[in-house]
């Protein structure tokens, strides 16, 4: 059974746009490359043909994975979310207990993660450690350097 992925409407639109691009633009480009390579003669010694066929296989795999992801996606209705506990799409401000450094992250699906925008995947150790916590709770999270403690300062949607 395929895994359900929870997305924002924006995230689902982005995936659909990428899928449309792969099908409408990339697929015809690769077909054209295969046809051009085929015209060059002997396929048994044609590196261009082999490369184009391999690219086609990778593209079809990517299209298939995107189609599965979209098919199993559920759009989250923010109006139905609680802001008193950390969950997917929560915007969480945390403070490192040791060095007092504050960070704010929005917990999103893997496909929407973008650290520059402060969006981290719910699959990351930090996000997993924060899930279900409330303001004031301390989350003990395993990090590469050992274990860190983060205090939940604020949760919003």
Image (cartoon, rainbow, N blue to C red):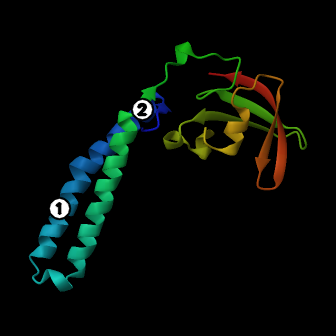
Residue pictured at 70% horizontal, 26% vertical: 132
Q: Which residue is mark 1?
A: 31
- Give coordinates of residue 9: x percent, y percent: 43, 27
Horizontally, residue 110 falls left or right of residue 54, namely: right
Percent x, y for residue 54? 29, 68
Residue at position x 63%, y 33% in the image: 106
Which residue is the extreme one toward the top?
79
User: Residue tagged by mark 2?
Assistant: 73
- Per the image, label 2 sits on a secondary structure element best described as strand
User: Dot 1: within a 10 Å radius of its alpha carbon, few (fewer than 14), some, or many (20 or more) residues?
Assistant: some
In the image, residue 55 sits, relative to residue 135, either above or below, namely below
If the image is split into quadrants, where does the C terminus sit? top right
Q: Quote the CA–CA distance across marks 1 and 2.
A: 30 Å
**Horizontal and vertical percent for residue 20?**
27, 43
Residue at horizontal 12 percent and vertical 84 percent from the top: 42
Is residue 53 something one can see in this rendering?
yes
């Amino acid at each position: 059974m395929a895994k359900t992925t929870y997305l924002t409407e924006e995230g689902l639109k982005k995936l659909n746009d990428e899928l449309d691009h792969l099908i409408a633009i990339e697929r015809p480009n690769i077909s054209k490359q295969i046809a051009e390579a085929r015209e060059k003669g002997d396929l048994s010694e044609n590196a261009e043909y082999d490369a184009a066929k391999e690219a086609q296989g990778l593209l079809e795999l990517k299209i298939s994975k995107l189609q599965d992801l979209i098919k199993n996606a559920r759009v989250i209705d923010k109006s139905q979310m609680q802001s008193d506990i950390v969950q997917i799409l929560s915007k969480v401000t945390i403070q490192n207990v040791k060095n007092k450094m504050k960070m704010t992250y929005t917990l999103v699906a893997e496909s929407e993660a973008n650290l520059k925008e402060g969006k981290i995947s719910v699959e990351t150790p930090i996000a997993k450690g924060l899930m279900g916590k409330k303001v004031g709770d301390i989350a003990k999270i395993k990090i590469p350097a050992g274990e860190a403690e983060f205090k939940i300062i604020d949760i919003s949607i």
